[in-house]
Amino acid sequence: MFKVNLLTRDGASIAFEAEPSETLLDAAERASIYLPSSCREGGCGACRVRRTSGEVELMSHSSAALSDAERAAGDILLCRTQARGDLALHAPFDQAAVGYASLPERRATLVEIAPAGSSAVRLVLQYEDDPAFGSAAQFTAGQFVKVTTPDGSVTRSYSLANAPNWDGALELYIRLQPNGAFSTYLRRAAIGDALLITGPQGQFTVDQASTAPRWFVAGGTGLAPALSMLRQMAEFADQRPCRLFFGVSRAEELFALDAIDELKAMLPQLDVTICVWKPEEAWRGFIGTPAEALAQALATGPERPDIYVCGPPALIAATEEAGHATGVAQDRIFSEKFTAA
C-alpha cells in the first residue's frame, strides 16, 4: 500500500492510499474521494494531474488525452496510472471539484431543442424535482454532465453553457456527428423526453485565486463552457478584463451570437473575436482559427492572461504554442479537449 498526496490548485491537501494493482482513480474512490474524470479509459484527459515525486506505471492511453510532451513534463492520467511508491501529485483544479460522495444521478426533461448553426443543436433540459437534490442546477461554471438517452442505450459527456441556477435548467450545445449514436437520438428527440443526468463533474473551471485577465478560446461547441464561465462572471459583476476568441470552419456553422451579444451588454469590458477558418467572400470578420487570433492578440498587447481553451486537440496544442511563444506560463493555460466517443 502506497501513500498518495494530491495538492489542489487552491492549496488543499487530499490524501489516500493506493494498492499497486489499482488505478489512482479507483484508489481514491475506495476512500470515498471522487476526483474529476470522465471516460475512465485514458481517452479524454479529464483526470490529468502532474506527478511531482514518486514512481508510477502509466498504462496505455490516447495521445490526444495525454501527449508525449505532457507525459515528459510529469503529467499522468489518474484512470490509467498505478502507484509504484509513495506519490506527490499536483492538480489543476480547486478542492471544490473534488466530491466525497458518488456522482448524483437525476432525471431531466427535454424542454427545448433547436438548430445551432448548420452542424449543432441547442438543448435545454429541466431537472425534475429530486428528494435529495431539490430542483436547482448546482455546478461550477465550466463543468460537464453525462447525458443518457431515454432508452438507456447511449451516454455522452457535454459541457454546460448556462450558469448555475435555482430553476434547474441545463443548456447544452451538441455537435451532430454523421453516424454518432447520440446524434441519431437527437435527430428524433421530442419535447418531453426524459433523460438521465450524471454529474456535474470536471476540472475545467476558472482559477478564483488569480487576478489575471481571462481569455477564452473556443472551437465549435467548445464555446459552451466559455459561455458558462462568462455568464457567471456577468452575474458576479466581475470587472476584470476578458476576451473571447470563438471560431468555426465555415460561417454557416456559427451559433449563439445572440448569447454573445447579451454577454457584451452585461460585461462591457468583454472583447470578442469571431473567427472563420474557411470563409465565403462575404465574410468580413477574422479569417483563421481562434488560436491564430489569440496569437495576434498576445503579440500586440502587454497582457499575460489566464487562458481557458476548449475544443479539438489541435486547437489546444495551437493555443498552448501561442501562449508559450509569448511568455504565458504552462500553468496559466487551462484546457478541456474534445475527443471521440
Image (cartoon, rainbow, N blue to C red):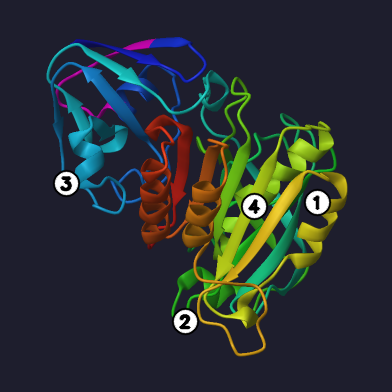
Does dot 1 land on a helix, a strand or a loop? helix
Alpha-carbon distance for marks 4 and 1?
Answer: 11 Å
The residue wearing badge 3 is: 60
Kindly identify the amino acid type of the residue bearing the numbered disc 3: Ser
Q: Which residue is drawn at 24% across and 52% down?
A: 63
The residue wearing badge 1 is: 263
| 276 up-or-down from 224: above or below | below
Q: Which residue is drawn at 18% across and 36% down?
A: 72
- Callout 1 environment at 10 Å: few (<14), some (14 to 19), or many (20+)? some
Alpha-carbon distance for marks 1 and 3?
Answer: 42 Å
Q: Can residue 192 be seen in this view?
A: no
Does dot 4 land on a helix, a strand or a loop? strand
- Quarter of the rendering containing residue 209: top right
Does dot 2 land on a helix, a strand or a loop? loop
First of labels 1, 3 by sequence position: 3
Q: Are marks 4 and 1 in contact (CB under 8 Å)?
A: yes
First of labels 4, 3 by sequence position: 3
Q: Do the residues labelled 2 and 4 touch (CB within 8 Å)?
A: no
First of labels 3, 2 by sequence position: 3
Q: Where is residue 58 in the image (x, y as percent from the top left)?
A: 16, 35
Q: Position of residue 70 (x, y in %)?
A: 26, 39
Does dot 3 land on a helix, a strand or a loop? loop
The residue wearing badge 2 is: 178
First of labels 4, 1 by sequence position: 4
Nearer the observer: mark 1 or 2; the answer is 1
Q: What stretch is highlighted in magenta?
A: 15-24
Q: Residue at x 56, y 71 (%)?
A: 248
Q: Can residue 98 be seen in this view?
A: yes
Alpha-carbon distance for marks 1 and 2?
Answer: 32 Å
| 18 up-or-down from 330: above or below | above
Kindly identify the amino acid type of the residue bearing the numbered disc 4: Leu
**Quadrant for the C terminus in the image:** bottom left
